[in-house]
Image (cartoon, rainbow, N blue to C red):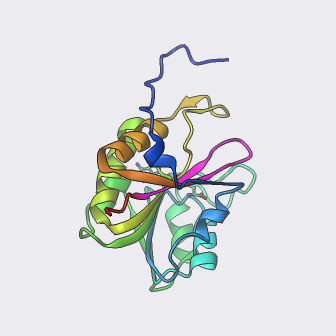
Amino acid sequence: MFSKKTQQKAPSLTAKHLINCKVVPLRHSILAMLPKNAIVAEIGVLGGDWSDKIIKNTTPEKLVLIDTFCSNDYPHLKRFTKNSHFDFINSKFSTPSIDIRKGLSWECLSEFEENTFDWIYVDAAHDYKSVKKDLVEVHRVLKPNGYIIMNDYIMHDHIMKEDYGVVQATNEFMLDNNFEMLCFALHPDMFCDVLIKEIPTQ
Ligand SMILES: C[S@@+](CC[C@H](N)C(=O)[O-])C[C@H]1O[C@@H](n2cnc3c(N)ncnc32)[C@H](O)[C@@H]1O
């Protein structure tokens, strides 16, 4: 069943945005391409399962976890409810190197100074307007030569039957800010990740 609403198309990238792009089987491969012992943020945390992978594989010096923390857990796990989400994450990650921020992603990011982060994983709201707002703040707080990973680089969630704006917002951001794609990570349901970085000036 296709959505009857016409989706806004994503602007096309050009060869210069893709020339260095590697395709990998899963998002886990991207972690090996990122700096270790870095200053990192994950935007959209849910149960902290991906945060665990970030910590294990990249040992960040500082990890900022941002979420509204008012979601239910995956139905098959049921580790927390909307009411206990924040407490669950706080007790799971109670260590000084992890900074937990509760609120809308772009508002939480606005609390940080520019050029703070080495890399940022973006996986909060997936609608176009929210991703645009996230990317404005992500760009502001990212260090020069920092990396952004956009999760769910897909036009439509075929499981929840919901349009996403991640591809449109990401491509616009790359074109406007001269970013290239360094990695495209496949996913079994095609909820792919992309790793992007500013194109170095020669
Ligand atoms: C897909 S889950 C994140 C999954 C996690 N990154 C992982 O890979 O395991 C999305 C999370 O984003 C949060 N979220 C959605 N919209 C948000 C927003 N505007 N600001 C902050 N968090 C948001 C939800 O509460 C949810 O926990």
Q: Is residue 16 above or below residue 159?
A: below
Estimate the x, y position of residue 174 in percent, counting from the top left.
38, 47
Q: Is residue 75 above or below residue 3?
A: below
Residue drawn 28% across and 70% down?
A: 115
Observer-nearest of 143 and 53 = 143
Magenta run includes residue 190: yes
Q: Quadrant of residue 200?
A: bottom left
Task: Say which quadrant the N terminus sits in.
Answer: top right
Estimate the x, y position of residue 12 in percent, counting from the top left.
45, 33
Q: Is residue 128 above or below residue 20?
A: above
Residue drawn 73% across and 57% down?
A: 77
The residue range painted magenta reads 183-197
Look at the image and tell me whether residue 197 can be seen: yes
Magenta run includes residue 167: no
Residue drawn 69% across and 48% down?
A: 187
Q: Quadrant of residue 120?
A: bottom left
Residue drawn 44% across and 39% down?
A: 14
Estimate the x, y position of residue 188 in percent, counting from the top left.
74, 46
Observer-nearest of 12 and 94 = 12
User: Looking at this rendering, what residue extends furthest in the front direction?
Assistant: 202
Look at the image and tell me whether residue 65 can be seen: no
Q: Is residue 3 left or right of 180 when viewed as pictured?
A: right
Task: Say which quadrant the C terminus sits in.
Answer: bottom left
